[in-house]
C-alpha cells in the first residue's frame, strides 16, 4: 500500500475513534486528571513529547521549536482537542520537555527498540 493511502486511512480511522472517544467522555466525564479532556495532554507528568513520533521534526530529525521553545504535535486527537492551544496552522503547541498525552508513541531505533 502506498504511503499516502496509508496516511489517509490512518486519519480516517482516527476520525472514527475521536467520535467514539467524545461519546465516551460525554457519558463518563474526564478520564485523566490534570490533563485536557480529549487527548489527556498535560505538562506535569514523568513522560515527554521529545521522544514521541508525533512531535514535528525538521529534516535533520531534530524537534521543531518556535521562538518560545515550544514544539508542535501532529497527532489527530491532539489536533481535535479544543482545550489544546494551536498555532496559525492549527497545529497543537506542546512543551517538548514536559508535555505528554495519552497517545504518546516512543521513537524506535534501527533494531526496533524504544529509544
Ligand atoms: S502531545 Fe502526545 S502525541 Fe503529541 S508529541 Fe506529545 S506525547 Fe506525542
Image (tube, rainbow, N blue to C red):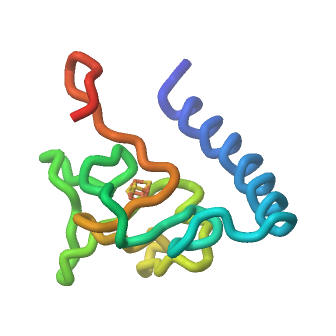
Rendered-image quadrant of the C terminus: top left
Split into quadrants, the picture shows ligand 1 in the one at bottom left
Relative to 29, 63 lies left or right: left
Residue drawn at x 81%, y 58% is 24
Q: Does 67 sit above or below residue 18?
A: below
Q: Residue at x 22, y 62 (%)?
A: 64
Image position, residue 95 (x, y; %): 30, 71
Q: How many labels does the image show?
A: 0
Residue 67's place in the image compared with 37, above or below, is below
Taking the image as shown, residue 100 lies to the left or right of residue 46, namely right
Q: Residue at x 74, y 56 (%)?
A: 21
Which is more toward the observer, 7 or 23? 23
Q: Could you say which quadrant of the image residue 19 lies in? A: bottom right
What percent of the width, then of the height, locates residue 39? 57, 62
User: For this rendering, which residue is in front, 66 or 18?
Assistant: 18
The quadrant in which residue 65 appears is: bottom left
- Quarter of the picture containing the N terminus is top right
Residue occupying image coordinates x 31% and y 59%: 46
Amino acid at each position: 500500500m502506498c504511503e499516502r493511502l496509508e496516511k489517509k486511512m490512518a486519519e480516517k480511522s482516527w476520525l472514527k475513534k475521536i467520535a467514539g472517544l467524545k461519546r465516551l467522555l460525554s457519558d463518563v466525564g474526564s478520564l485523566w486528571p490534570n490533563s485536557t479532556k480529549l487527548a489527556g495532554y498535560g505538562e506535569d507528568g514523568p513522560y515527554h513529547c521529545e521522544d514521541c513520533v508525533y512531535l514535528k521534526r525538521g529534516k535533520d530529525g531534530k524537534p521543531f521549536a518556535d521562538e518560545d521553545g515550544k514544539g508542535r504535535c501532529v497527532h489527530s486527537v491532539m489536533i481535535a482537542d479544543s482545550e489544546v492551544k494551536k498555532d496559525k496552522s492549527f497545529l497543537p503547541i506542546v512543551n517538548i520537555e514536559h508535555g505528554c498525552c495519552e497517545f504518546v508513541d516512543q521513537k524506535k531505533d534501527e533494531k526496533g527498540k524504544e529509544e
